[in-house]
Image (tube, rainbow, N blue to C red):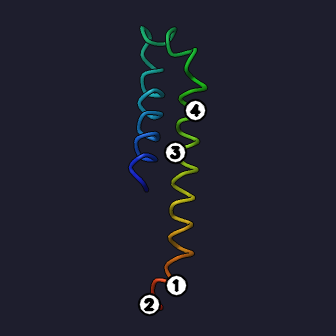
Amino acid sequence: MTFVGLLILTSGFFLMTLAGVSVVRRWILDYKYLAFSAVAIGMFGSVMDHGSVNVALPTIAKV
């Protein structure tokens, strides 16, 4: 996983964790879609990163 993907994924999980706190709950309701999109983009980036490595490994092994 790249650093940017890990950063996006971590920020999404952090926002989702904060959503359980009652004081922050009203504030975070506006950002629930932002948190979901951060997690979704991070997961997509991770899948793309690992997929490209799996495709490239046989080519790298031949060299």
Q: Earlier in the sequence, mark 2 or mark 4?
A: 4
Q: Which quarter of the image is occupied by the C terminus? A: bottom left
Question: Nearer the observer, disc 1 or disc 4?
Answer: 1
Query: How far apart are labels 3 and 1 at the CA level?
Result: 26 Å
Q: Which quarter of the image is occupied by the N terminus? A: bottom left
Question: Nearer the observer, disc 4 or disc 3?
Answer: 3
Q: Residues within 10 Å of mark 3 (few under 14, many from 20)?
A: many
Q: Earlier in the sequence, mark 1 or mark 4?
A: 4
Q: In the rendered structure, which amino acid carries the disc numbered 1? A: Pro
Residue located beneath label 2 in the image: 63
Q: In the rendered structure, which amino acid carries the disc numbered 2? A: Val
Query: How far apart are labels 4 and 3 at the CA level?
Result: 10 Å
Residue located beneath label 1 in the image: 58
Query: How far apart are labels 2 and 4 at the CA level?
Result: 41 Å
Q: Earlier in the sequence, mark 4 or mark 3?
A: 4
* Callouts 3 and 2 close, C-beta under 8 Å: no
Q: Is residue 24 toward the left or the right of residue 40 in the image?
A: left
Q: In the rendered structure, which amino acid carries the disc numbered 3? A: Gly
Q: Earlier in the sequence, mark 3 or mark 2?
A: 3
Q: How many marks?
A: 4
Q: In the rendered structure, which amino acid carries the disc numbered 4? A: Phe
Q: Is residue 3 toward the left or the right of residue 36 in the image?
A: left
Question: Nearer the observer, disc 2 or disc 4?
Answer: 2
What number is the disc on residue 42? 3
